[in-house]
Image (cartoon, rainbow, N blue to C red):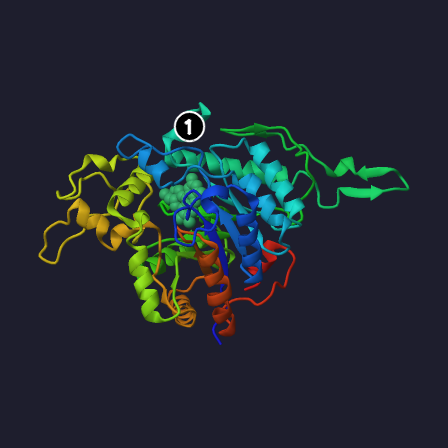
Amino acid sequence: MANPFHLGWFLGNGFGVYAWDDTWRGTQARDWYKPAFYQDLARSLERACFDFVMLEDGSFVPDGYGGSSELYLKLPTASPKLDPAVTIPLMSEVTSRLGLVPTLSTSEYPPFLLARLVSTLDHISEGRAGWNVVTSRTQITGENFGTHFPDKEDRYAIADEYIELVKKLWNSWERDAIIADLERGVFADHTKVHRVDHVGEHFRSRGPLNAPHMPQGEPVIVQAGQSPTGRQFAAKNADAVVGIGNGVEALKAYRDDLSERMLSVGRKPADLKLMYLIMPVLGETNEEAQERSKRWKQFRQFDLEWGLALASKVSGIDWSKFELDEPMPDVMQVKKDGVWQETAAPPKQYNPDGTEMTVRQTFESKGGGQFRGSNSVEFVGTPDAVAGQMGEAMEEIGGDGFLLQNLYVTRRYVSEICDGLIPELQRRGLTRTGYTNEHFRDNLKEF
Ligand SMILES: Cc1cc2nc3c(=O)[nH]c(=O)nc-3n(C[C@H](O)[C@H](O)[C@H](O)COP(=O)(O)O)c2cc1C
């Protein structure tokens, strides 16, 4: 029997208002901000034995396409959305084993505040906290916070010191500092609580943290670094990393590169779980699933203008300025190891006759698809067929699991995955049928 793999669910792209105009939208247009949807999702994921749910974040309303927020708000995307730090505890309340991963940015939270927040989350969830480490990605974030927004390389360098500091703070209380000794009237032993006195290039902090050692010691650190710097950061700091590359070969290259980087920083490749971002399309029959897949690609989220708007959001380049039927402008870095750089756009591609693809052709090509919803490998079919495809892909690429996402999250889609696909994966022995451990990290490390 094949080895089992892990499952995560990513609520991305401005989680919360995805399906407000979908046929299966339910009440989302009216009550997208209420806890019920997120709590229903959390219960479903735990029923299906997912390792974790991850909520994206970013503190800005995009306006990079044509210098206007019109398109972003019309869809909507990225905004409005709830704060993951508030939403995640609501999901914790209705679950007991599901890992809970908010996205929190090193460019937005002071380290002490973040250390305390994540510690609190690990306590109230009894050992299920994670942290998707991001450095934020647009200048607007800096403007919203009234702070200087460094470029990406610097943000990663700052994040390195940031992680070092928050780890010191998390460990400023020894595990057995709380003794709650009624006889002696001592709750916490002060000799086991230490100042950190961090003085670094970017941060200073005195400590100790005003929260005790957390159940997991430290949260499960998730990262989605794609650039060489981002990958190095993940190799050094993360417990799980998200792979997005276009197709099996690109993912293999990504995996091999990460393994080398892990070895270069003295870690075992097996200590970093590699999760591939996917968006399965299911149907009662394979034909129906194919038909749905075609239909989904016609959703607004997948149309050309949307692709250009999303590219503008992540790249800082205004793609409304280019002629659609002219060759691609020379503004992007070259795709490296099959994965785009964050500041890049789709790489130049060529038609069979050797001519350069136009902007329109590029964004409409499979390669341009990343800007219309990241999908590492396409899985389309009945639950039985998709379970088989996922097993085969994992065997071929190697890796540790899949991170599922959908741009149109409805209760129907959640049920299709949790009550249709997952039982088929479980029947094949490919995913867990129960949680062996109480803590998120222990479950993630189990296989
Ligand atoms: C699945 C996934 C989720 C991400 N979530 C966020 C997010 O919530 N907020 C954010 O600012 N960046 C997010 N990112 C961006 C990554 O943190 C990272 O910046 C990006 O993948 C580019 O990698 P690089 O920084 O190494 O270039 C996400 C990326 C991926 C693939």
Image quadrant in which you'd find residue 313:
top left
Q: Which residue is mark 1?
A: 142
Query: Which quadrant does the C terminus fall into?
Result: bottom right
Left or right, 383 with respect to 351, comes to right
Q: Horizontal and vertical percent for residue 153?
A: 38, 36
Tell me the residue at 53%/49% (across/down): 37
Say whether residue 438 is visible. Answer: yes
| Depth order, front residue of 32/385 | 32
Q: Is residue 15 left or right of residue 184?
A: left
Question: Looking at the picture, does residue 420 appear above or below residue 312?
Answer: below
Instruction: Confirm if mark 1 falls within 8 A of ligand 1.
Output: no
The outermost residue toward the bottom is 1
Check the image and name the residue furthest to the right: 183
Query: Where residue 405 sits: x, y (%)?
Result: 42, 54
Task: Name the side, left or right, on which 342 lies relative to 163.
Answer: left
- Identify which residue is drawn at 62% across, 43% down: 121
> Is residue 230 something that shows in the picture?
no
Q: Image quadrant of ligand 1?
A: top left
Between 242 and 361, which is closer to the camera in this rendering?
361
Residue drawn at x 64%, y 50% is: 127
Residue closest to the eye, 286 or 271: 286
- Which structural element holds mark 1? helix
The quarter of the picture where residue 276 lies is: bottom left
Residue type pointed to by label 1: Gly
Image point (52%, 36%), residue name? 162
* 178 sits to left or right of 165: right
Q: Position of residue 21 (x, y in %)?
A: 39, 47
Q: Is residue 306 above or below residue 209?
A: below
Image coordinates of residue 266 in percent, x first then y, are 49, 52
